[in-house]
């Protein structure tokens, strides 16, 4: 088994604004080569946490380590290895797409030959080669987002912060950005990702944490977080001529929250676990063969609503 290497470590972090703890004794570790999602409603502390991690904001207590070194405002060597893609489009309108990437890459890479190569790679990575001479005002919203991404990753950072990188983009650009993020991970970068599109988190992230009021409420993989939920799973079994005695026995089974049988469809809500197998075994023992079985497990968004009581999409 390969050794787990921690690229980002946050220990007992506190950031206080007057009487409000925007980050409240928060601890977190992010492993090398993973995409880690930060989820939370507006005001949960995500932006404050990121600014503290980047040493853009002084905090009241705790420690942030990047690649094993304490991060401070003067950690210039560490900052050279970090890329930030902000939610706002942060490019210069008077520069072409090529010159924008060249400018931001030049903040890190001074050798002209190496910088030129990395700019070309970044253009190719986000598929903006055909738009290299275009100024941002001539680009669509999706192409601007791709340019924003290219400016943040052209210097090949080991750690990348992506803040809502697919907001208001067309499906083609969104898919390209998401695939590009996976490729960055596969090439060795560690990525911290914030979004209010829950399906992106489920698709991209290896692990995630749900924040609210400056605290981490839960963390883990999609499956681990969903398994913590008390939300029932919905099951529909098409089965004909089901005897009343079997229905009564099913209703008494542990884990079955509700049950109805109408028109040959047995509908149940069940707590997650082995309850479905128990139901199917009961039908088999009674020599009853289902025509079909379908189910809908709780989604990450369902769990988010249960934990925070808020809708992520409406509060981003």
Image (cartoon, rainbow, N blue to C red):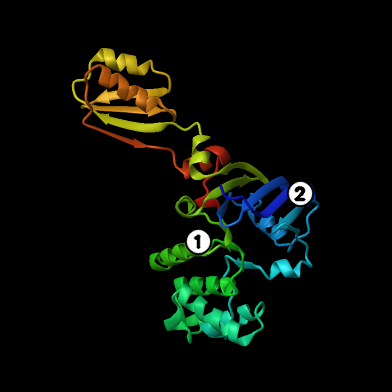
Give the percent coordinates (x, y) of residue 84. Answer: 62, 67
Q: Which residue is outermost to the top?
A: 245
Residue drawn at the location 41% of the way across and 67% of the way down: 170
Give the percent coordinates (x, y) of residue 296. Answer: 37, 38
Residue that numbered label 1 is attached to: 186
Label 2 neighbour load within 10 Å: few <14, some 14-19, many 20+:
many
Is label 2 in a helix, a strand or a loop? strand
User: Between 166 and 122, which is closer to the camera in this rendering?
Assistant: 122
Q: Specify which label sits upstream in the sequence, 2 or 1.
A: 2
Determine whether, in the image, residue 283 is placed left or right of residue 19.
left
Determine whether, in the image, residue 86 is placed left or right of residue 18.
left
Q: CA distance from mark 2 to mark 1?
A: 33 Å
Q: Quadrant of residue 269?
A: top left
Q: Which residue is outermost to the left?
A: 241
Is label 1 in a helix, a strand or a loop? helix
Residue drawn at the location 57% of the way across and 41% of the way down: 308
Residue that numbered label 2 is attached to: 14
């Amino acid at each position: 088994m390969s050794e787990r290497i921690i690229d980002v470590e946050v220990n007992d972090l506190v950031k206080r604004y007057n009487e409000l703890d925007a980050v409240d004794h928060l601890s977190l570790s992010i492993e090398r080569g993973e995409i880690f999602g930060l989820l939370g409603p507006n005001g949960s502390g995500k932006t404050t946490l990121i600014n503290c991690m980047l040493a853009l904001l002084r905090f009241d207590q705790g420690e942030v380590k990047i690649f094993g070194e304490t991060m401070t405002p003067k950690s210039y060597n560490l900052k050279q290895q970090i890329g930030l893609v902000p939610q706002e489009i942060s490019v210069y309108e008077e520069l072409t797409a090529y010159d924008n990437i060249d400018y931001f890459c030049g903040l890190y890479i001074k050798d002209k030959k190496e910088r030129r190569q990395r700019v070309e790679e970044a253009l190719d990575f986000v598929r903006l080669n055909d738009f290299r001479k275009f100024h941002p005002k001539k680009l669509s919203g999706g192409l601007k987002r791709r340019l924003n991404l290219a400016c943040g990753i052209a210097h090949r950072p080991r750690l990348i912060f992506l803040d809502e990188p697919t907001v208001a983009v067309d499906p083609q650009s969104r898919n390209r950005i998401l695939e590009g993020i996976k490729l960055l991970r596969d090439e060795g970068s560690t990525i911290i990702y914030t979004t209010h599109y829950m399906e992106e988190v489920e698709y991209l992230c290896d692990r995630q944490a749900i924040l609210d009021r400056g605290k981490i409420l839960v963390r883990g993989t999609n499956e681990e977080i969903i398994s913590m939920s008390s939300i029932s799973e919905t099951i529909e079994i098409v089965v004909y001529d089901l005897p009343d005695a079997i229905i009564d026995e099913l209703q008494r089974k542990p884990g079955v929250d509700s049950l109805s049988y109408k028109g040959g469809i047995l509908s149940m809500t069940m707590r997650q676990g082995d309850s479905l197998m128990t139901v199917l075994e009961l039908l088999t023992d009674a020599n009853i063969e289902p025509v079909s079985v379908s189910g809908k497990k709780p989604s990450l968004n369902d769990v988010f609503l249960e934990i925070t009581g808020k809708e992520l999409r409406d509060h981003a």
